Amino acid sequence: MSIRYNQKREAEKQPRLTGGHRMCAGCGAGIVVSGVLRALEPEDRAVVVNATGCVEVSTFMYPYTAYMDSFIHSAFENAAATCSGVEAAYNALKRRGKVDGTVKFITFGGDGGTYDIGFQSLSGAMERGHDMVYVCYDNEAYMNTGVQRSSSTPRFSRTTTSPVGSVQPGKRQQKKDLTEILVAHNIPYVAQTAPIGNFRDLHLKSHKAIYTAGPCFLNILAPCPRGWDYPAAKLADIIKLAVDSCVWPLFEVEEGQWRVTYTPKKKLPVEDYLRSQGRFRHMFQPGNEWMIEEAQQQIDQKWERLLERAGG
Amino acid sequence: MMKFMSGNEAVAYAMKQIDPDVMGAFPITPSTDIPEVFAGYVANGEVNTEYVAVESEHSSMSVCIAAQAAGARAVSATSSCGLALMYELLYVAASSRLPISMACVNRALTGPININNDHSDSMGARDSGWIQLYAENNQEAYDNFIQAMPIGESPAVRLPVMTCMDGFITSHAMENIELLETAAVKAFVGEYRPEHYLLKKDNPLAIGPYDISAYYMEHKVQGAEAMKAAKARILEVAAEFEKVSGRKYGLIEEYRLEDAETAVVLIGSSAGTGKAAVDRLRSQGVKAGLIKIRVFRPFPGEELARALAKTQAVAVLDKSEGFSANGGPVFAETRSALYDLKDRPALVNIVYGLGGRDIRVEDFERVFGRLADIAASGETGPVYVHMGQRSQAQEVMA
């Protein structure tokens, strides 16, 4: 990563997402959005695009917007297509001399709007090669409608549509590997990050995504206190546990080259991560030890595969 | 300049002359020629348009919404299931007051799949807040598209405009049409100058809020008022268009209606067949007339009431089945429009032409025959019937 990161300087920038929005205390999505937008150079304008979801209904409730930049939301499943329309207009108007200056295009969608209902729109926009960044704030379920499972929800997680019952262990299926699917689109830059520590990883990847020409994709972990069932004050701890247990590895794929950007000094057992959240509580009941074992195996395999791809 | 063209080519050519900023393009029969012909203009540098070949109609309307919101002029074309896939976004476009122009080449909606003409696609979108203009032939398809932007972009209106033509019948049949010079089209359509847009420097704009109950209703009322205002604007644009083209347009077209005792009301290409039937009947001394609805949204209720006030019996022809068990959409609105007349004609509804079923001059003669019976006897009989079925025994037209 070429640019220098100075947390103090970044924190002193005029925020692009102002306070006063209506996201919950302890929500990861708000700090993801403000963190990504902070990577914009102050002289550059942006158009921010949202899929319907928590962020959208909490940041732009008529007549108040929390964004300093232009913003558009149109529907749940079309955020990437919407961003491509704005970018197409920019190209057309620029050619005709009707707009000037640099404008960046940044889209935010939750996992429902990205892994599921907006997946086709995202794939199409990436394939067409629009100069845009798509950011998935991944909170691993449909949180805006009250915690329903998505294809991003991890196996065994309890949601309202994958409840824990006498014959069902929470969600039965594995989490879809969306980041890898985006890598398969052969776009210039794909990265997975989280708002962790001093936000260095998130900032540098956001900056690279915003200032790399062509379509770029960021998958960013965004814990949800309501859906994951943790005390609001524990947000930072949970993100750290996710990263240090390799449940949510931090890596980037630049022009096809895989690189792990953070290796835990001591890889924590997945159990530590699972124990921090109510959605996994049933995994700790007597007789359910196999669930934790299976989860650990799954995480280990994926981490090994990532290390192989990144060249050990 | 006279040119031999299909309806699709005529619309694509109008788009070329306008040279819009952005086109959302996705193929669907029978509108496919429009993005196809336009792609040729793009490939040869004949237009300066950003051509976005998306992966679905849902995305093509999303692109148009975003591009128009960003300050650009956006166009698209679609048919049938493509329009149905856009359904939720049609409301977004209209409620965000984005004057997108889209050609809808009318085709039956799937269930079962059928590629031929009826109006079930655009009739399903009639309450989405889009202005709807319908063409009888290739010339009108071309003329309507050129009038779409001056109508929709007008500050009093600011609504998206759908210009409809009948699939295959109009979209694929070749006709000689009169084209305007490109300079004349450009001058007529003018520059798009929105007041507020996403890419405007030093004045960011936010579009598409979560609109709570304290505000939502006012926004809907504004849309309703804009639709009312569109009527006058459509006539204004028609008057300006007549000056440059010599061709006259209104909200409805009245054909031999002055002293008509019986009349039919319909939309689209069947009007040509209907006019031939009226002429034949007139030559036999029958006082028959016809009304073609050009503008379905806003609905020309007062104009229809005025035009039909002196008739005795009227058949409203619907080229889509509404499944209301009470008649098709054109009938429902026409009958409602006539309710306030002191002396109302008797009204019947004839659903016809579904999925490309043909309608002939003889069919219109049967309709007028029934209207004559109603006028003479005062007995309306069955109000809601389907004409042109395989077995005529099931019909009540004879």
Image (spheres, rainbow, N blue to C red):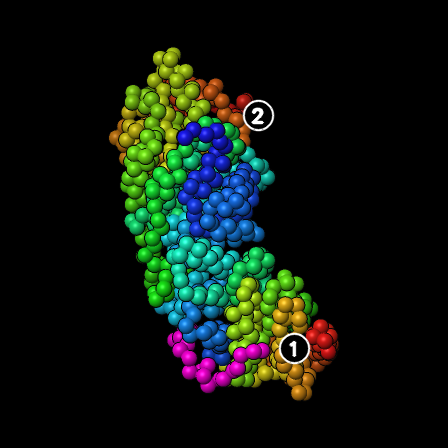
Q: Which residue is mark 2?
A: B390
Q: Which residues are magenta?
A: A1-21
* Residue B269 is one of the magenta-drawn residues: no
What x and y, as percent, mark residue A10?
46, 81
Residue drawn where x is 29% and y is 22% of the image: B258
Q: Point out the residue furthest to the left here.
A: B342
Q: Position of residue A139 (x, y in %)?
A: 56, 72
Residue position marked by numbered label 1 in the rendering: A260
Secondary structure of the residue carrying numbered label 2 = loop
Question: What residue occupies the far bottom of the structure in this picture?
Answer: A265
Residue B320 in picture, x, y percent from top left:
48, 35
Q: Is residue B261 above or below residue B244?
A: above
Residue beneath the point at 38% across and 57% down:
A98
Identify the mark at residue B209; answer none if there is no mark. Answer: none
Quarter placement of the C terminus of chain A? bottom right
> How many labels were placed on the picture?
2
Q: Which residue reaches farthest top?
A: B284
Whether residue B327 can be seen here: no
Q: Quadrant of the N terminus of chain A?
A: bottom right
Q: Residue at 67% of width from left, 66% of height from top?
A: A173
**Quarter residue B33 falls in:** top right
Gap in Å between the C-alphas at discs 1 and 2? 69 Å
* Residue A107 image point, x, y percent: 50, 65
Q: Chain of mark 1?
A: A
- Are the numbered discs 1 and 2 placed on the same chain, yes or no? no
